[in-house]
Image (cartoon, grey):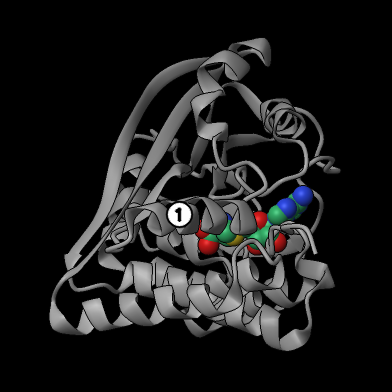
Amino acid sequence: MAARDPHRFINELDEAAQERLVSRLESRAKDPVFASLFDKYAIRLALPPSAQVLEVGCGTGATLRLLASRDDFTGTAIGVDQCRPFIDAANRFAKAENVGDRISFGIGDAHSLDFPPATFDVVIAHTLISHVTDPARVLSEMARMVRPGGTVAIFDGDYSSLTYAFPDHGFGHQMDVALASATFNNPRIMRDLPRLLPKLGLQLKNAWGDAVVEIGSGRFFKSFAETYVPYVKMANLLPAQAVDVWLSEQLKAMENGTFFAACNYYTYLAHRI
Ligand SMILES: C[S@@+](CC[C@H](N)C(=O)[O-])C[C@H]1O[C@@H](n2cnc3c(N)ncnc32)[C@H](O)[C@@H]1O
């Protein structure tokens, strides 16, 4: 089977696989380093009082819950995702955290949404754009739905920079490439945004990169490897036995303090002209 990005084809996965992705999204959002990357751009969103915010590809709503917990957010937010079980989980978690009155969730395809033009002050895509079928179309929808002067925020990994140390450098590199292509439809898309955004009437205001790095121990990259290695095997990208050895060596390295993994993440904040 060819590589099939699990988030792009989420609705074709079985219930157990969808549940594993719910857990991955929730554990990732609770990772202090990863959560700090959201804080770093949330503070620069310049949210007006009573801001209306949309997150496209909201998953289980973890990012909007972080937004709702911020003192500078006094408005309301809507999250849209293509996956019903994710939206059900998002509603459950928001209720459990007592933010269900300020954030709501619905089903939709980020390539084509029903909201009228210029509805929102801020439109966010937090690790969505690497997964979608047509990134330019999704960005164009985001540009359509934000009001003039409003902000479009796009945050995602540059998954061609994803790397785990492995003693056999050749196989290690093959595994890095296999993990990126099994998991992401658009592993290099964040490099294209300076070219794409102006074509959509979006003026780049601020952009920066952050490296997520774990040396010695691994938590963020442990969950990443355990979640997505099965998709490398399903796609037959590399011999299954060698992939199993790679994973068990990563877990051993985490236990004995010799682990290393890293990936670059980029944030773009653009204003609607
Ligand atoms: C990696 S998750 C990110 C979820 C959330 N933004 C977060 O950071 O926790 C990617 C999400 O994009 C959603 N997605 C992928 N393609 C989509 C599309 N065309 N329309 C709506 N959602 C989509 C998936 O269902 C999944 O929930």
Q: Residue drawn 45% across and 30% down?
A: 268
Residue at 58% of width from left, 53% of height from top? 77
Residue 242 is situated, as x and y percent measured from the top left of the image, at: 50, 74
Q: Is residue 30 visible to us here?
A: yes
Quarter of the image that includes the C terminus: top right
Q: Is residue 220 above or below residue 44?
A: below
At label 1, the amino acid type is: Asp
Q: Position of residue 211 (x, y in %)?
A: 28, 45
Q: Tag count in the figure?
A: 1
Would you identify the image quadrant in which residue 196 lies? top right
Q: In which quadrant of the rendered image does the N terminus lie?
A: bottom right
Does residue 86 sit above or below 125 in this rendering?
below
x, y percent for residue 165: 28, 60
Residue carrying label 1: 176
Task: Give the vertical position of 154 relative to 201 (above or below).
Answer: below
Q: From the viewer's perspective, is 236 left or right of 93? A: right
- Quadrant for ligand 1? bottom right
The picture places residue 110, in percent across and down from the top left corner, at 76, 45
Give the residue drawn at x 58%, y 72%.
100
Q: Nearer the viewer, residue 122 or 160?
A: 160
- Residue 249 placement, left or right of 256: right
